[in-house]
Image: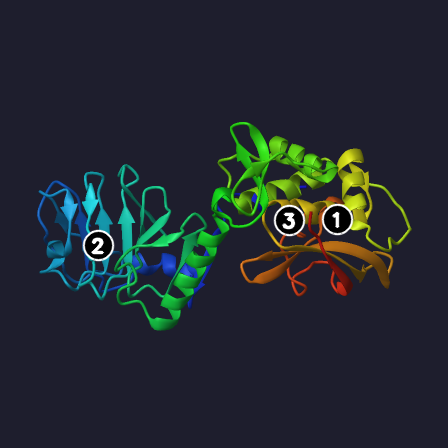
Amino acid sequence: MTTSFFDNKKRITIGLKAVAALLSIALLTGMCSVKVNAAGNVSGAGAGSATGATVGSVSGASKIDQSTFRRNVDITTVHIGSDVTEITPGAFKGLMKLRSITVSENNPFYASYSDCLYNKDMTELLCFPPQLDGAMIPSSVTKIGEYALTGVGGKLKDDIRAVVKSQAEQNLKLEDVPGEHFIHTKYGVKWREADGSYSEPDTELKKLIASVLEFATDETMTQNAQLERCFKYLVDFSSYERNNEVPVGDWTGEYAKDMLMESKGNCYNYSAAFAYMAKGLGYDSKVCTGTVLSSLGGKTPHAWTEVKINENWYVFDAEMQDAKGDGYYKQTYQSYPAKPLEKAAAITVSF
């Protein structure tokens, strides 16, 4: 299995134009630019050429506010130097022609990505230029600053808010997730009750999953990151064992225990084990059974996991990930690589 799927630098694309088009903005004719740092005054806002933009400079102040640009409202590009230590909310409110903001890599307080302005650790979007038709938003962004979307069109503004909201929900720490679930404490992984109290895992299945969390995750990880790590653990430390028997009755708990104890099993074991891992992390989860496209042609019986993230259910197929190598984490029935995946039954799991 490759680890590229778990790269924490993944990006989400928003907007109406391709990213390649966004990267060419700095070369457009007629751009008006200004550099912001602590070594000069605002100057030189004018027409650009076909090879680049006219660049002025700002200095003498480490703080940027709305007054910084009051005589340069036609600015389209802003570069923030390493000496700038404070940018007030609304500093760019009057720049309705702004297309791009870049920041010196040496600035300790601010950063830029895909022409937008962020705080240094890229958790908060501080300015999305109003003339920017689209951008890539880092998955670490969970907050939108005051006035950050001033001048941005309605549909694009809604898209940005939706993406950041989704990322904020996916970046919750387990201590912020309501309900019953496992949680890391200084005394090890415990079970958090609905009332917020902690208890020792009190069943064999809970103890097995707690041991996986102890090994594969830690308290610094978000709920979403721990889900990814549990999936990776199940794929990396398990092997397929053929068993043509189709389970009946109340089977999911026993199949999950067998998988976690023996580290081998078939699709029913994989799907049950991951469903209980997800449930233990506070997600609603189901074991689904039905058919999948067979490598020999036709259809074959199969089992997989569904996990509810935000308001949507996603397909997680650890057994197929183990067999095929990649592409079976957090899919839909439309994006599932070995489709058609046809569900006949679903079992909601609980402890």
Query: SS class of the residue under badge 1?
Result: helix
Vertical relation: 220 (above or below) 243: above
* Res 209 quadrant in image: top right
Tell me the SS state at disc 3: helix
What residue is drawn where x is 63% and y is 45%? 280
Q: Position of residue 218 (x, y in %)?
A: 54, 34
Which sits in the foreground, 73 or 52?
73
Task: Residue 272: give its label.
Answer: 1
N-terminal of the pair, mark 1 or mark 3, is 1
Query: Residue 52: which disc?
Result: none
Among numbered discs 1 and 2, the one appearing first in the sequence? 2
Quadrant housing residue 237 = top right
Q: CA distance from mark 1 to mark 2?
A: 49 Å
- Amino acid type of disc 1? Ala
Q: Residue furthest bottom?
A: 154
Which mark, residue 89? 2
Image quarter in which the N terminus is found: top right
State the scheme by which the image is colored. rainbow
Mark 3–mark 2 CB contact (< 8 Å):
no
Cα–Cα span, label 3 and label 2: 41 Å
Which residue is farthest right?
Answer: 244
Q: Is residue 206 visible?
A: yes
Specify the label residue 279 is tagged with: 3
Give the SS element for disc 2: loop
**Do the residues bearing badges 1 and 3 touch, measured as CB atoms within 8 Å?**
no
Q: Earlier in the sequence, mark 3 or mark 2?
A: 2
Q: Nearer the viewer, residue 236 or 48?
A: 236
